Image (tube, rainbow, N blue to C red):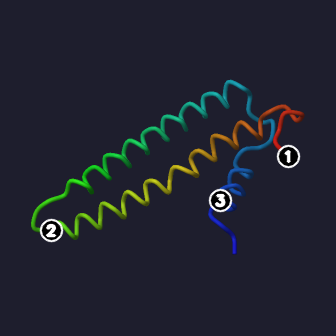
């Protein structure tokens, strides 16, 4: 069985060709991915905040819904961080790459 991390790794290897991007392009992509990652964590925390402070007649339904949404948002953070790491690793000089 192929794990999600292996799927993301395989996809990122096909999307970013080794040595094809210059340092400035990798820095720009990395900056955007880090902004996206920060936004995902912010959205996760806001979702969990609503989840923790839910009240009212539909408490259980919204509580469960927000918990599920929070889990899905948090699950998105690892692939985004992996893409950032992969862009740097694949475009580093050969002697500096992880084995």
The residues bearing labels 2 and 1 have C-alpha atoms spaced at a distance of 52 Å
Residue at x-position 74% and y-position 51%: 13
Under circle 3, the secondary element is helix
Residue at x-position 69% and y-position 61%: 6
Q: Kindly give the residue lying farthest to the front in the view shown.
A: 52
Which residue is label 3 attached to?
Answer: 5
Asked whether the beta carbons under mark 3 and mark 2 sit within 8 Å of each other, the answer is no
Residue at x-position 46% and y-position 38%: 38
Residue 4 position, x and y percent, is: 62, 63
Residue 17 falls in image quadrant: top right
Q: Which mark is residue 99?
A: 1
Q: Earlier in the sequence, mark 3 or mark 2?
A: 3
Q: Kindly give the residue lying farthest to the top in the view shown.
A: 24
Under circle 1, the secondary element is loop
Residue 99 position, x and y percent, is: 85, 46
Residue 25 position, x and y percent, is: 66, 29
Q: Which mark is residue 58?
A: 2
């Amino acid at each position: 069985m192929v794990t999600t991390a292996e799927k993301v790794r395989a996809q990122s290897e096909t999307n970013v060709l080794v040595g094809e991007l210059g340092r400035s392009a990798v820095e720009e992509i990395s900056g955007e991915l880090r902004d996206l990652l920060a936004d995902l964590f912010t959205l996760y925390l806001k979702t969990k905040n609503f989840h923790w402070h839910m009240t009212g007649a539909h408490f259980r339904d919204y509580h469960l819904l927000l918990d599920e949404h929070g889990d899905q948002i948090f699950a998105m953070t690892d692939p985004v961080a992996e893409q950032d790491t992969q862009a740097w690793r694949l475009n580093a000089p050969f002697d500096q790459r992880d084995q």
